[in-house]
Amino acid sequence: MISPLKIFVPQRFPILFTPSFARMCKLTFALLFALMALMHQANAQVATPIRVSMQPGLYSMLAYKVASANGYWQEAGLLPTFVSYPAGVPQIKGHADWDVGTTGTVPALIGARDFDLITIAIADDQSKTNVLMVRKELLEKLKQTKTIPTGTKIALSGNSTVDYAVQTCLALWGGKLKSDVVVVDLPQAQVIAAGAAQQVDYVGLWAPNMYTMQEKHGFTPLCSAKDFSPGIYGIIFANREYAKLNPKVVARFLAVQMRAIHWMKRHPKETQALLIATAAKDGITISPSAALSDYELRPLFDLAEQTELMAGKTKEIDDSPIARSFLSMNIFLNEGKVQSRRLRPSAFMDASFLRMVQADPELSKFAAGK
């Protein structure tokens, strides 16, 4: 029987194109394709390490968890290591141990002055979730007198966004200054404990701690930053030197953030469930109603909204909404003698990494969830 291979092969090469030679060729090509596939897979698995700082259990940090759960880090070729801190001040002091991260407006501003940290994007709007709270039974009397009594004890965490919120709230309620009240500076967990033990009648808290006081200890919000200020934002920031040396990595990091925010805005129930589960792992209890409040009270911003918030409609950073927030914080910090000089927002705000995401077809498509 004539081999089918010989039908297509010139007869002067009968020995070269035998069935055994054909099988050897097939085996060789199969091994070659397998080797190429392994090389491609190996290349795909080489991810760039990046150290990400965060504060556990906070809604503004949830995008990192969403990205991990949905595989966005891997898609962007990043391998994150998360570094956790209990609050913003220790976070910025530990800046040598991380590359990028998320924090509040006040620590971001102090970090810009002391450690050359730059603001590169916005995590969320926290204006409604930094509040001065009062024991419910005192609220009616306060509404009548419209002033917080001089010498009142207020427990709060100093040099933070809620410190800023409380001080401006004092001005609204009787024109009081920080010097007119007795400030008890405590970590947030101890602020809750002081209120629960009835050691103080007023507390300054951020979410989700404010929900705990409301649900379990009989406190109610008296005033939030939304009532008076240009806004309080969750800030995505970076070490300037790291960003300068690794601009493409920082752009990919922001693309992951934008992709996670895109998902969160379109999956409210799943986002709330993830917030509850994530907080529980961090030892923080968040009720379903508190998770719903967090989702509704803290707006998120997509890539186009982020760029406008950072750069402003006039493209002048110092005239942008985020810059106005920072300028207001600057006044607060100088009056509190925390900040010895005022920084122009353009000195530490950098929207170029967001623009890099917008300008890159693949990154912008990825950030938009396409």
Image (cartoon, rainbow, N blue to C red):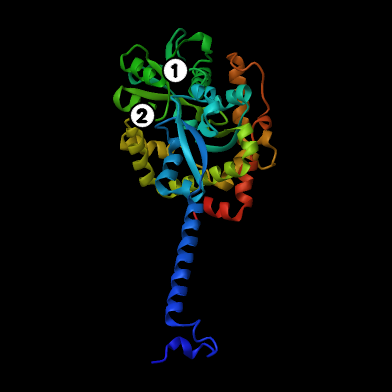
Q: Are marks 1 and 2 in contact (CB under 8 Å)?
A: no
- Residue situated in front as seen by the camera: 7 or 156: 7
- Residue 56 at x, y percent in the picture: 41, 31
Residue at horizontal 43%, vertical 71%?
A: 27
Query: Can residue 140 be seen from the camera position used here?
Result: no
At numbered mark 2, what does the secondary structure look like: helix, strand or loop?
A: helix
Label 2, residues with CA under 10 Å away: few <14, some 14-19, many ≥20? many
Residue at position x 50%, y 27% in the image = 225
Instruction: Using residue 334 as the reference point, say whether residue 222 is left or right of it.
Output: left
Q: Position of residue 140 (x, y in %)?
A: 37, 20
- Of marks 1 and 2, which one's residue comes earlier in the chain? 1
The residue lying toward the viewer, choosing from 49 and 303, is 49
Name of the residue lying farthest toward the front: 15
> Residue 183: where, in percent of width, then height?
46, 11
The percent position of residue 303, horizontal first and vertical second, equals: 56, 47
**Mark 1 sits on what residue?**
156
Label 2 belongs to which residue?
Answer: 211
The amino acid marked with disc number 2 is Tyr
